[in-house]
Image: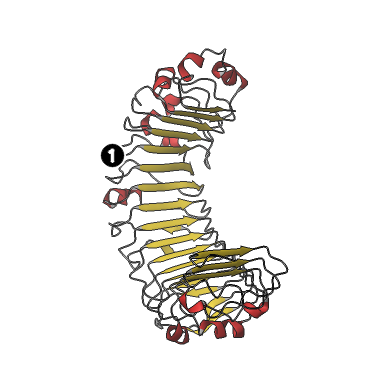
């Protein structure tokens, strides 16, 4: 007998369990119910469903697909077969109280709703929607009308690994958008402008056409922009109006050619900036940076870092990741060639992929605040900045020479200086 005081119950892997309707009625305090991998389960304790706050089913029978918790505020549905468009719309009628909805692995759903107008009649409290690994999903709505924005409660939308998703017509009140690994999506539109959007994340959506990313028509209240593996994107044209932006990532966009580096000082709220793995990006010069910048990851662009010229980093910059590799041949062999990129305020420094780098014994001496040093995939590296080693809290080196491995071993010349570092990992 399960104690009546239970508030949370998870049943998992009971392959022969068919019914719990007669065994759980006494759980009057139950608020959270999860049933996973009970493939013969046919019913639920219906008298308890109205009081549930969250309800999750995964890998169960088709007979459960329309049994929903009408009062649940959080609902997760995973790996349920037989959930067609028609069946799902029947389920939606019971979701009036749901605020967070997660749908994963329901491979027969093509459209979540007929139209946004119809969805808005039942999903009156929905604030967060996550859809992942639904292999036949084409779009959210079967009928998507321009200018329609009636699903006013929805604030957060995440779409992941929906390989046949073609388009996404977004409600106007969306604040956070994340579209990840949707290979066929070719259209993302905000019916009336998307002026409340604060977070915009697009990762590996290779069919999205070229657009002027971060242009003045986008909402000025944007706080987070993360773009990765958008192969058709060719330019970022203007940044001056995005004074609320605190995180900007542009990574692995092979076609992007231009970036308005001169606008960076105007990003007065920007704290995290990543610009890397964009070999077509030709920037005349970096040199002036956002005044509150605390983290910067940069490199593997058209021009090598060694040719960036003098930098004027703000004193707020404490974490710096530099990446070798570029469309032009990388020529960095010593740390002195990188010293112009290394402000004395740094507490964390990572060097990645400088394949010709042999020595960092010089060029890092001024980093008196450095606590964490990592050197990754620099296969010719032979030495370290000895004067900095005693003050480090971590030292990580991967893919180094046998000579350096010997120096950092227990009998090596560096051992007296690195033996007191709390975390050392050298391969």
Viewer-closest of 212 and 226: 226
Mark 1 is surrounded, within 10 Å at the Cα level, by few (under 14), some (14 to 19) or many (20 or more) other residues, namely some
The x, y position of residue 141, in whole percent, is 52, 81
**Colour scheme:** secondary structure
Q: Determine whether, in the image, residue 367 is placed left or right of residue 158.
A: left
Viewer-closest of 32 and 230: 32
Kindly give the residue lying farthest to the right in the view shown: 16
The x, y position of residue 34, in whole percent, is 56, 67
The x, y position of residue 302, in whole percent, is 49, 44
Q: Determine whether, in the image, residue 267 is placed left or right of residue 26.
A: left
Residue at position x 54%, y 21% in the image: 382
The x, y position of residue 133, in whole percent, is 60, 66
Viewer-closest of 29 and 125: 29
Give the answer, above or below, for where 40 lies relative to 117.
above
Q: Is residue 76 visible?
A: no
The residue carrying mark 1 is 314
Q: Determine whether, in the image, residue 266 is placed left or right of residue 320.
A: left
Give the answer, above or below, for where 335 lies relative to 232.
above
How many numbered tags mark residues here?
1
Q: Determine whether, in the image, residue 295 is placed left or right of residue 109.
A: left
User: Helix or strand or loop: what does disc 1 sit on?
Assistant: loop
Viewer-closest of 151 and 398: 151
């Amino acid at each position: 007998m399960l104690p009546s005081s239970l508030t949370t119950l998870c049943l998992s892997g009971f392959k022969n369990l068919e019914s719990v309707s007669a065994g759980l009625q006494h759980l009057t305090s139950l608020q959270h119910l999860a049933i996973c991998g009970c493939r013969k389960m046919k019913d639920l304790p219906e008298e308890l469903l109205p009081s549930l706050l969250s309800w999750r089913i995964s890998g169960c029978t088709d007979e459960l697909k329309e049994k929903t918790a009408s009062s649940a505020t959080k609902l997760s549905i995973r790996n349920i077969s037989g959930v067609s468009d028609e069946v799902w719309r029947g389920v939606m009628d019971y979701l009036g109280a749901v605020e967070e909805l997660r749908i994963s692995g329901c491979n027969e759903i093509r459209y979540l709703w007929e139209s946004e107008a119809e969805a808005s009649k039942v999903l009156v409290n929905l604030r967060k929607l996550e859809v992942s690994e639904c292999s036949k999903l084409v779009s959210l709505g079967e009928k998507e009308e321009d200018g329609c924005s009636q699903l006013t409660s929805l604030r957060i939308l995440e779409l992941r690994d929906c390989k046949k998703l073609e388009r996404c017509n977004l409600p106007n009140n969306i604040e956070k958008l994340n579209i990840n690994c949707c290979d066929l999506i070719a259209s993302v539109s905000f019916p009336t402008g998307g002026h409340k959007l604060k977070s915009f994340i697009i990762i590996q959506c290779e069919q999205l056409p070229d657009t002027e990313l971060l242009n003045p028509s986008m909402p000025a209240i944007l706080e987070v922009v993360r773009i990765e593996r958008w192969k058709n994107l060719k330019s970022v044209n203007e940044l001056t109006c995005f004074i609320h932006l605190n995180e900007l990532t542009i990574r692995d966009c092979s076609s992007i050619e231009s970036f308005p580096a001169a606008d960076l000082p105007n990003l007065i709220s920007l704290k995290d900036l990543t610009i890397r793995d964009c070999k077509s990006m030709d920037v005349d010069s970096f040199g002036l940076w956002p005044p509150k910048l605390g983290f910067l990851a940069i490199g593997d662009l058209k021009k090598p870092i060694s040719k960036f010229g003098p930098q004027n980093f703000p004193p707020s910059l404490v974490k710096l990741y530099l990446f070798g590799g570029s469309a032009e041949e990388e020529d960095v062999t010593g740390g002195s060639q990188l010293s112009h990129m290394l402000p004395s305020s740094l507490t964390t420094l990572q060097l990645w992929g400088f394949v010709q780098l042999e020595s960092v014994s010089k060029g890092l001496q001024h980093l008196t605040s450095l606590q964490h040093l990592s050197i990754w995939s620099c296969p010719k590296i032979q030495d370290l900045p000895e004067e900095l080693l005693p003050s480090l809290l971590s030292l990580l080196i991967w893919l180094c020479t046998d000579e350096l491995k010997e120096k950092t071993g227990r009998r090596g010349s560096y051992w007296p200086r690195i033996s007191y570092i709390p975390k050392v990992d050298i391969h």
